Amino acid sequence: AAHVVTMRLIGIIMAQITSRMDPYYTTTPCAVLDSMFYHNKPAVEALYPDCIGFYTGVTPDQRVIIKGTSGGRPDEIAASLNSAFGASAWLALLIHTIAAELYLRLTSAESERLRKVSYRWQQNAGMKDPGNAGLTAQRLGDAEPWVCPDDDQTLYDDGESFR
């Protein structure tokens, strides 16, 4: 969900920037324009004469080219946002991937604590080779086998032991 919010924010910023430069153009179906203008056939036909075929039924899937501007009519604002959609999605994905990797690198102590808790659960369940089951670095990569460094220490901050 956070990716979508970030993507929308980036998209709005990108639309503002690109509409101030040489604006981008996008294609939009006349059916979408008809909906945007509340089925006002004369207004759509006046702005986009190519949509006449859509209203007569000759070309029901007719598309027209729209210039994307951030402060114009609704169709121009939508064209501006649509032109920035793909790039903003990729940029938001990149930002969230970097943030997740950074978070994992900065919280190694919490990761180790959770691994110890998982070790205890696996040990109590009678699993073979507790602490090294599942997708671990030594199983998939070239890391050394993991052993629980503190077999009888407290694993929770409130002083409560796992056992």
Image: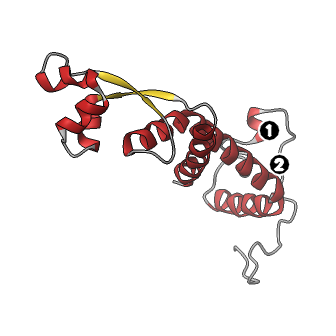
- The answer to whether residue 78 is left or right of residue 20 is left
| Quarter of the figure with residue 56 | top left
Would you place residue 55 above or below residue 43 in this image?
above
| Quarter of the figure with residue 134 | top right
Q: Residue at x 58, y 52 (%)?
A: 9
* Cα–Cα gap, marks 2 and 1: 8 Å
Q: Position of residue 95 (x, y in %)?
A: 69, 46
Q: Position of residue 3 (x, y in %)?
A: 57, 49
For badge 1, the amino acid type reads Gln
Q: Nearer the viewer, residue 50 or 81?
A: 50
Would you place residue 28 above or below residue 158 in this image?
above
Local secondary structure at mark 2: loop
| Quarter of the figure with residue 153 | bottom right
Farthest front residue?
46
For badge 2, the amino acid type reads Trp
Q: Residue at x 50, y 40 (%)?
A: 69
Local secondary structure at mark 1: helix
Farthest left residue?
56
Q: Nearer the viewer, residue 155 or 121?
A: 155
Q: Residue at x 19, y 19 (%)?
A: 53
Q: Which label's residue is closer to the chain start, 2 or 1?
A: 1
- The answer to whether residue 56 is left or right of residue 135 is left
Q: Decide: few, some or many residues near mark 1? Use Cα within 10 Å; few <14, some 14-19, many ≥20.
A: few
Q: Decide: few, some or many residues near mark 2? Use Cα within 10 Å; few <14, some 14-19, many ≥20.
A: some
Q: Position of residue 66 (x, y in %)?
A: 42, 30
| Residue under label 2 | 146
Q: Nearer the viewer, residue 47 or 162?
A: 47
Is mark 2 in CB contact (under 8 Å) with mark 1?
Answer: yes
Farthest top residue?
58
Q: How many marks?
A: 2
| Residue under label 1 | 138
Location of the C terminus by quadrant is: bottom right
